[in-house]
Image (cartoon, rainbow, N blue to C red):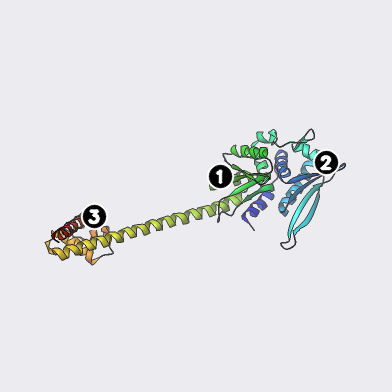
Amino acid sequence: MTFALRAKNELARRPFGNACCQAAELAAFVRLNGSVQISGKHITLNTVTSNAATARRLFTLFKQLFHFTPELLVRRKNRLRKNNVYLVRISEANRVREVLSALGLVRDGLPVQAVDPAIRENKCCRRAYLRGAFLAAGSVSNPEHSYHLEIYTDYRQHAEDLAALLKTFDISVKITKRKNGHLLYLKDSEQIVEFLNVIGAHSALLAFENVRILKDMRNRVNRLVNFETANVGKTVAAAVRQIEAIRLIERRVGLDALPPSLRELARLRLLHPEASLQELGEMLDPPLGKSGVNHRMRRLEKLSKTLLAEKRKAK
């Protein structure tokens, strides 16, 4: 089961809430996934979904809000995959008109593309409308793979209205043209989490957050490992450079020619090529801090460069 399907199954089993919220949720679903068929005097409203739990929710919403029982049909979408399509149908013309008018989808016999102002006014109804929109035409990717949530709508006006509803919850969505419609999408993980919270998909939210936290931890560990690897590389390169400098001094003038403080450190470096500056400092008597060891190493390297320059000059 996909992450999106789990989220929708959770939403489909949520308590229905107040009548105004039920109407808002149903309005979004019918607007996005409903179609009206007119044949002579016959008018039919078809609402389609491939999710059985969502179909049951639609059926119940129609029944509770309008006090009649719609038809519920099941059709096979694809023989090989055996997917079902669930069709919630209202066949009586008067009831279709009643539903479309009550949901704010038709006014004076003409379709309305804008979201009903009554829905905009109430926070609970805005949540319900967004929930219905997601159930009808939304999707969210598995956070293990990517952060992406989207809702598709046919009309630009409706896309902008959805974006405005989301903005009231501090969610900034992007809109792009897609085929014959418009796609609203989120790619920021925190915004997706907030959207799931707004529509009431709390189990999906927790699952999303768990994955996000684990991914962040893995990324932090990887960064630390890369940082440590880089540091080890720098330490090794510095040690090689220091040993080469000490070997050159040893060949040219001998380590006994060095001051005692430099001579002791030079011999320790040759004996412990893998040691860090801090570890070398701890081996000295008396012990010396990392910065002090680094200063003495620079003196040794500077001396080796001077001896090398003299050698080249003599040639």
Q: Looking at the picture, tell me which residue is in the foreground, 271 or 58.
A: 271
Q: Residues within 10 Å of mark 1 (few under 14, many from 20)?
A: some
Q: Is residue 194 left or right of residue 279?
A: right
Residue under numbered circle 2: 95
**Disc 1 or 3, which lies upstream in sequence?**
1
Residue 13 appears in the rendering: no
SS at badge 2: helix
Q: Quadrant of the N terminus?
A: bottom right
Circle 1: residue type: Gln
Q: Quadrant of the C terminus?
A: bottom left
Q: Position of residue 255 (x, y in %)?
A: 15, 63
Q: Is residue 47 left or right of residue 127?
A: right
**Residue positioned most to the left:** 257
Circle 2: residue type: Arg
Residue under numbered circle 1: 191
Q: Residues within 10 Å of mark 2 (few under 14, many from 20)?
A: some
What's the CA distance linking mark 1 and mark 3?
48 Å
Q: Position of residue 236 (x, y in %)?
A: 30, 61
Disc ID at residue 26? none
Q: Residue drawn 60% across and 45% down? A: 185
Q: Looking at the picture, tell me which residue is in the foreground, 150 or 143.
A: 150
Q: Quadrant of residue 184?
A: top right
Q: Residue drawn 14% across and 64% down? A: 252
